[in-house]
Amino acid sequence: MSQAVPAIPAPIPVRIPLREIVPWALFVGLLALIALYFVSAEQGATAVFANSYLHEFLHDGRHLLAFPCH
């Protein structure tokens, strides 16, 4: 004799309003632009910081991402 297995209802996805996503998307976008600046342009005449510590810290990342460094 077989017994019927009760059907498990599918979970209903939670809807996140767009007004809650936009501030986080802007924040992440700003952080990405800042990271892109430091990896790509923080050297030489465009340097924000006078010493070369930041340049040396990001040096291998530049080569990994194929940005010219020298």
Image (tube, rainbow, N blue to C red):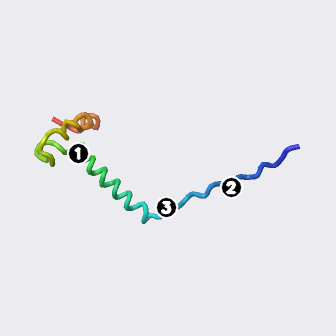
Kindly state the secondary structure of the residue where label 3 is placed.
loop
17 left or right of 69 in image: right
Distance between the alpha carbons at the discs numbered 3 and 1? 33 Å
Q: Residue at x 25, y 34 (%)?
A: 60
Label located before the other in sequence (1 or 2): 2
Q: Amino acid at mark 2?
A: Pro
The answer to which of 59 and 63 lies nearer the viewer is 59
The answer to which of 6 and 36 lies nearer the viewer is 6
In the rendered image, residue 56, in percent from the top left (x then y), is placed at: 19, 36
Q: Residues within 10 Å of mark 2 (few under 14, many from 20)?
A: few
Q: Amino acid at mark 1?
A: Phe
20 left or right of 32 in image: right
The answer to which of 54 and 32 lies nearer the viewer is 54
Quadrant in the picture for residue 67: top left
Which residue is denoted by mark 3 in the rendering?
A: 16
Which residue is denoted by mark 2 in the rendering?
A: 9
Q: Are marks 1 and 2 in contact (CB under 8 Å)?
A: no
Q: Residue at x 34, y 56 (%)?
A: 27
Kindly state the secondary structure of the residue where label 2 is placed.
loop
Quarter of the figure with the N terminus:
top right
Kindly state the secondary structure of the residue where label 1 is placed.
helix
Label located before the other in sequence (2 or 3): 2
Q: Residue at x 30, y 52 (%)?
A: 31
Quarter of the figure with the C terminus:
top left
Position of 16 relative to 39 (above/below): below
Tag shown at residue 38: 1
